Image: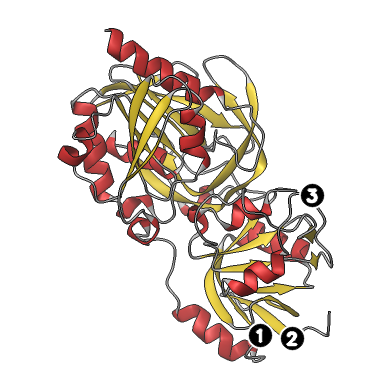
Amino acid sequence: MGKRRAAILVLEDGRTFHGEAYGSVGETFGEAVFNTGMTGYQETLTDPSYHRQVVVQTAPHIGNTGVNGEDDESGRIWVAGYVVRDPARIGSNWRASGGLEDRLATEGVVGISGIDTRALTRHLRERGAMRVGVSSLDDDPRALLERVRQSPRMVGADLSAEVTTARPYTVEAEGEHRFTVAALDLGIKRNVPRRLAARGVTTHVLPASTTIDELIATGADAVFFSPGPGDPATADHPVALAREVMRRRMPLFGICFGSQILGRALGFGTYKLGYGHRGINQPVLDRATGKVEVTSHNHGFAVAWPGREPDDSAVAWPGREPGLGAVDAPAGEAIETDFGAVEVSHVCLNDNVVEGLRAREVPAFTVQYHPEAAAGPHDADYLFDRFAELIEGGKNA
């Protein structure tokens, strides 16, 4: 490989890093976030929840296993840009069908390599996620900084329509068909319907604009709200749809963005985390069982629990208070909503942020992390069993 072209990364507060072009030569803007996973870069790149984000990989060596045709979580790479320290010179794995940098270049993903990603991550932890620009076309940090500050923020971003499926499609159950689920695609990952299919569930994946009548027309026994990008405070249509689903007492399960949507539908607020949870090593407590799970996360927003309303002084950064909306209530304590009592079912042990909700009087529950875990540990896979049991209970009621 020849000498790489010079590149710069400029954060909106002016912090600048100099490195080399990686992937496509060009210029890109987005929200700078970091992912702590030691593996799973292909799943990260193709996760729609990273739309409009420039992902910093904290693992120093990226690209070691190349890329393949099986591990994509959607039909394309969604990240706005990619930041790595030491790109692998050669990708080596028996499943590999190509190299990571070639894939990035083919899909026009602008990246930067050779920078101190540890220093960049520490900066984001201390200052919070922020807008960023990466350029291998312009070496003037001041000029790039001006363009960064003119780029859109993540707060207030309504992105579901940009990542959702254009038309409905169906993923059939494996083996004997047990249930039918209507999944609202707000940025769904392929492994969600796979995990449902393994439990005998046929999944109808529907566009984010789907109406309640269109959803009912699928003949679904239950409803799933998917992960996705953007600010949940903008997602008024999915919130209204979730409320209608709960009025009809259809079993409902939401993951990540879908969890935040359901939180809003139950009457809770949402807020932006200081730097978010992104990685495959996050400890979460299941308050019903006392079990601690190691889980996969990708979210920059969270549900605000009453009694700990968000404010600028409670950001989950080192030296400050635990996360905004952190849960101080003891396990079992519930809040009354339009749909009856609701309790916090799961809590992140790093910062005490709400990671799951359970409604006691309607068949609905959520988790803000990723039990489909692609990539990641399988500790939370049981939640799909819990969903199947909820559906079965409704059919037998």
Q: Amino acid at mark 3?
A: Trp
Quarter of the picture containing the N terminus is: bottom right
Q: Are marks 3 and 1 in contact (CB under 8 Å)?
A: no
Instruction: Point out the residue furthest to the top here.
Output: 397
Residue 55, percent across and down? Answer: 62, 62
Tell me which numbered mark, 3 or 2, is placed earlier along the sequence: 2
Q: Residue at x 59, y 74 (%)?
A: 13
Q: Amino acid at mark 1?
A: Ser
Q: Are marks 3 and 2 in contact (CB under 8 Å)?
A: no
Say which mark, if any, is on residue 212: none
Q: Residues within 10 Å of mark 2 (few under 14, many from 20)?
A: some
Q: How many marks?
A: 3
Q: Are marks 2 and 1 in contact (CB under 8 Å)?
A: yes
Q: Which residue is mark 2?
A: 6
Residue 164, percent across and down? Answer: 36, 54
Front-most of residues 369 and 79: 79
Front-most of residues 11 and 64: 64
Q: Is residue 290 above or below residue 174?
A: above
Q: Which residue is mark 3?
A: 94
Report whether residue 338 is seen: no
Q: Residue at x 41, y 33 (%)?
A: 172
Front-most of residues 111 and 139: 111
Q: Which residue is mark 1?
A: 136
